[in-house]
Each structure stands twice: as C-alpha cells, then as structure tokens.
Amino acid sequence: MPPATEIVTLMVNGDRREVGVPGHYTLLEALRYGLGLTGSKQGCDKGDCGACTVLMDGEPTLSCITPIREADGRRIVTVEGLGTARGPHPLQDEFDLHGAAQCGFCTPGILCSAAALLARSTNPSREEIREALSGNLCRCTGYTKIYEAVEAAAARMRDNG
Ligand code: FES
Ligand code: FES
C-alpha cells in the first residue's frame, strides 16, 4: 500500500504553496522532491552538517530533521528566496567576490544561517559569525573566506542603511 499523502501549506519564498507528500517526509524532502527546490542540500540527512539549513519563521532550521507536519503553515525561506538574479542578497555577491564557495555544497545552508545573523545585526563580531555558522560544516574553504564574505556583506548592508 503506498504511504498516505498529506497536504501541507507552506509560505515558501513569499509564495503560498500547497504540496502533497508522504506523511513521513521531512521539510527538506518536501522542498526538494515535492516542490523542486533543490537549492537546500541533502548532506548527512541526520542533523549534523547544516547543508539543509533553511529559515523557518526567520530562524535557521535543519530541514532534514524537521517533520513536514511541523512546517505546515510556516514561513520558509530557502537559498532560492534570499535574492534574485538581478538583485542578489549582499551575502551572495560577497561570497562570489571572496571566493567563499568552492564545491558549493555547504553554501546554501551557510547563506541561510548568515542571512539570519545579518537580519539581527549588521555589525556582528568575527566570534558572532563563527558562532552563527557553527552548525554548518564546510570541507573546502577553511572558513576564513566565508567569515570575510559575511563581514563584507554586513558592511555593505550598513552602508546601504
Ligand atoms: S543534511 Fe541536514 S544537517 Fe546534514
Ligand atoms: S565549499 Fe565545499 S563544503 Fe563548503
């Protein structure tokens, strides 16, 4: 017998979306396989790496361990919703300029975690940035370029008021 389908409503990247998915799905599975939003990455799939991080009601959330029922009716922002091709988020610009993404697998989750930090404060210390990104593992960059990119994005956001 096929698994029972649940209909959940998500506010994803500003749009109201209804999606029918098996009840055991996680938020990550619903985003990737129900809505085709594959920017959020399926890394460890058990809450260890941060590659699946999205914003749920503005808070960084590990979507791979979030049951889809918990996300019903919530406001979700994925990396696809942080900016647009014409108007990227300052973080996206600065990651590009600083070479802060190498293989890029960790990048969507890191961008979401960093975006939540900069929404709270556009003048975070290096320690605060380190803390905000402590749940996001990167095997490639050594983190320094990531921290510098976040600092540059913060400065740009301060300059833009
Ligand atoms: S894929 Fe979610 S924490 Fe690794
Ligand atoms: S850029 Fe490859 S894991 Fe971070």
Image (spheres, helix red, strand yellow):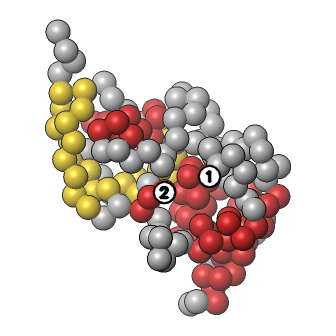
- Residue 109 seen in render: yes
Is residue 1 left or right of 51 when viewed as pictured?
Answer: left
- Residue 113 seen in render: no
Residue at image position (25%, 26%) is: 22
x, y percent for residue 60: 51, 52
Q: Secondary structure at mark 1?
A: helix
Residue identifier under label 2: 79
Q: Nearer the viewer, residue 117 or 99?
A: 99
Is label 1 within 8 A of ligand 2 (CB to nearest ligand atom)?
A: yes
Is label 2 within 8 A of ligand 2 (CB to nearest ligand atom)?
A: no
Where is 74 relative to 44, above or below? below
Quadrant for the N terminus in the image:
top left
Residue at image position (52%, 41%) is: 41
Amino acid type of the residue that numbered disc 1 sits on in the rendered structure: Thr
2 and 1 marks in contact (CB < 8 Å): yes
Rendered image quadrant of residue 160? bottom right
x, y percent for residue 75: 32, 57
Residue identifier under label 1: 107
Quadrant for the C terminus in the image:
bottom right
x, y percent for residue 33: 34, 36
